[in-house]
Image (spheres, helix red, strand yellow):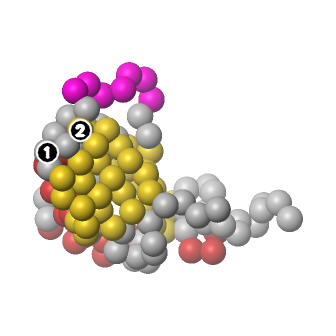
Amino acid sequence: MNLNQVTIASLDVAKSTEFYKTLGLKLIVDALPRYVRLECPDGESTFSISKVDSLPEGNKITLYFEVDNLSKTVLDLRQKGITFNTEITEQSWLWTDINLTDPDGHKLIIFYAGKNRKNPPWRVN
């Protein structure tokens, strides 16, 4: 089984599209104002944004985007006007990450984990 895509709800698909394009995703389906689909710059995953009249209540999803050079990515995104909720943090689970939110309040984590993403020292055999 392979993860094909993730779809999030948005009050303003155009605004969210610009946010994710600024992060580096490439627009591949444009059905504004109700739907868009973007392609991640690495790998095969895609990401969709779908128009809703109201956002779901309760916990929102958390999106994780892995990059090879977290410091450079954060610097580049700050220069493009992206703001972060935290600073780069070394986590106890051997990831380095930084947190932000998109225009609809969905939590994003941009991280670097390397081999520890799928093969941490405590991996079950």
Q: Which residues are magenta?
A: 53-59
Quick one: SS at disc 1?
Answer: loop
Residue 107 seen in the current view: yes
Q: Is residue 98 above or below residue 10?
A: below
Amino acid at the residue labelled 2: Lys
User: For the C terminus, which image quadrant?
Assistant: bottom right
Q: Residues within 10 Å of mark 2 (few under 14, many from 20)?
A: some
Residue at (41%, 76%) from the top-left corner?
A: 42
- Label 1, label 2: how far apart the Cα atoms are: 7 Å
Residue at (23%, 38%) from the top-left corner?
A: 51
Residue 23 locus on image (x, y percent): 26, 63
N-term-proximal mark, 1 vs 2: 1
Residue at (82%, 60%) from the top-left corner?
A: 124
Q: In which quadrant of the rendered view does residue 55 lie? A: top left
Residue 62 locus on image (x, y percent): 44, 45
Answer left or right for 98 relative to 15: right
Residue 48 locus on image (x, y percent): 33, 53
Q: Do the CB atoms of the residues marked 1 and 2 lie less than 8 Å apart? A: yes
Amino acid at the residue labelled 1: Pro
Answer left or right for 112 relative to 55: right
- 9 vs 60, nearest the viewer: 9
Q: How many marks?
A: 2
Q: In which quadrant of the rendered view does residue 110 lie? A: bottom left
User: For the N terminus, which image quadrant?
Assistant: bottom right
Q: Is residue 56 magenta?
A: yes
Mark 1, residue position: 33
Mark 2, residue position: 51
Quick one: SS at disc 2?
Answer: strand
Answer left or right for 123 relative to 76: right
Q: Is residue 19 above or below residue 10?
A: below
Mostly what secondary structure, the magenta segment? loop
